[in-house]
Image (cartoon, rainbow, N blue to C red):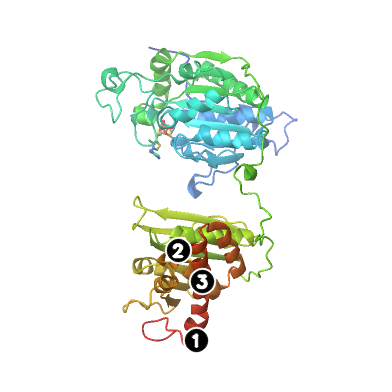
Amino acid sequence: MANESVVLMEPEVNLEVKPETNSDISPEASNNGYDLIHSKSPVFYDLFDRKSELKHQTHYCPGCGHGVVHKLIAEALQELGLQDRTIFVSPVGCSVFAYYYFDVGNVQVAHGRAPAAGTAIKRSCPDKIVISYQGDGDLAAIGTAEIVHAANRGEKITVFFVNNGIYGMTGGQMAPTTLVGQKSTTSPWGRRPSNEGFPIHMAELLATLEAPAYIERVALSDNKNIMKARRAIRKALEIQRDGTGFSFVEILSPCPTIWGKDPVEARRWVLEKMIPNFPLNVFRDRKPEIPVGNEPPQRPVADVLGITPKAAPHDTSGSKHAHRFKDVKIKIAGFGGQGVLLLGQLLIEMGMREGLEVSWLPSYGPEMRSGSAHCHVCLSKERIGSPLVSHPDVLVAMNEFSLRKFAHEVVSGGVILYNGASLPADFYAPELQVVPIPAAEIADKLGSTKATNIVMMGALLEETECLAPGTALSVLEDKVKKLDLLEIDRKALTAGRLFIDEQAHVGAVSQPDGFA
Ligand SMILES: Cc1ncc(C[n+]2csc(CCOP(=O)(O)OP(=O)(O)O)c2C)c(N)n1
Ligand code: SF4
């Protein structure tokens, strides 16, 4: 069908010719005789720093609808004065890099989870304008649950749903919105309802719910429809600004690259093929009536989680222990059942009581007992950027496998505490201080091999002086409920410390060749 309203996208910058004689135009304002009347929205960064050679352009293919939607959102945020309050939640998909373009708060989240992450952000920062920006694979396939429930709860966020009927980023697999008969890499004969089901109409589906305030479907098929899309995008943001409720705009959008069409044909395809299947409409536009009952009082998160510092008899918060480090990174590794993860938890509990910033990151395979397990522990005087410990200052190796696996990660001059009477004959780490400790034997003699990790804890505290033994005792007394085990743990802690004091430091044999 020949349709005169199908036109090429207007350029990002429109230049209007002004006569050079116009004395109102200063030399600075003029641009080779042109007066700039429309420029890139200040909601976009001046330069896109994704790649040094692409600082002036986005990563989108020519004719892609994402660029147009970005532009409409940026202009709406600018017009409504919302830039400084906005948090943009990028999805997984071609628009994953939105944070390179929008000069607003940015978060990038797991595939399909943008409405869930947006919920958390909006609830904790109700004054922010939260935008969940999603493709059809992201929103209508892997993220179906998240969008339905966010809409059903009436979260006061705005969702922009870019429906191009395909998985763009991954090369053209069928999406839930792929049209009947439309070919994709996973429906090479065209989508068949008998096998792949019918396309999902997300706007209509969400409009069956009570809570949403605004739902509209628009299209980037031609300038007239793009202007309607502009109004819908603005309105959705106004609805959030005014606290009215959940707003959702589905935008039928061209993906020329995957569709195998040029940009003009792709727009025409939106007009001729997509719109008849996905009718443009305002499906919802009203303030939802949500009954308010006796809402429970809001409580601080720490209170709800039960992590409020308590004035327990052994509370050592504000401990006078002098931390001589800025931060200590520890990796504890062994097999499931050796108390590897627990030892890490005890250390961070101690760190918290001594007023440090702490983090604990466990890692274990599907089999818990006997499978290998390790955890990363950070103790720091400053906020911790990442809980990941790639290069530990201290490795607590609870078995030979862990010693061999992680020793090379330890920083030069770092410490390895090894649960073993002696090091394996062929193990050699001249740049490290390696201390073998017969921790299992010591714990066994004290009454329980289970206390091996506590012997190692005692050794760690004595060797590094990173935390106070008194704090360790107080944590054990709070955490270990069985009195007989607590008694063994107390002794194990002391035994680990004494071992370092008496054996490791006096004539310690920390290398197989006899040199400490
Ligand atoms: C958990 C997970 N599953 C699958 C993928 C692979 N993946 C990346 S993008 C994508 C689909 C993107 O399609 P859509 O949401 O329609 O966005 P578009 O790229 O078309 O804008 C998929 C399946 C992934 N990154 N993560
Ligand atoms: S593959 Fe499609 S959706 Fe992705 S950038 Fe290219 S045109 Fe846009």
Sequence order check, earlier mark of 2 and 1: 2
Quadrant into which the C terminus falls: bottom left
Q: Nearer the viewer, mark 3 or mark 1?
A: 3
C-alpha span from label 2 to label 1: 25 Å
The image quadrant that residue 474 belongs to is bottom right
Using the rendered image of the protein, determine whether residue 378 is visible from the camera's viewpoint: no
Tell me the CA gap for discs 3 and 1: 21 Å
Comparing 409 with 380, the one in front is 380
512, above or below 203, in the image: below
Relative placement, left or right, of 166 versus 457 is left
Q: Quadrant of ligand 1?
A: top left
Q: Residues within 10 Å of mark 2 (few under 14, many from 20)?
A: many
Q: Is mark 2 within 8 Å of ligand 1?
A: no
* Residue underneath mark 3: 491
From the top left corner, tell me how far across and down residue 36 is, in percent. Answer: 64, 32
Front residue of this view, candidates 409 and 443: 443
Residue placed at 51% from the left, 16% from the top?
207
Question: What residue is pinned by disc 2?
Answer: 332
Give me the residue at 67% from left, 65% from top.
319
Counting every numbered tag in the picture gives 3
Please give the name of the residue rendered at 54% of the width and 32% of the height, measured from the top-left corner: 132
Image x and y of residue 79, in percent: 67, 27
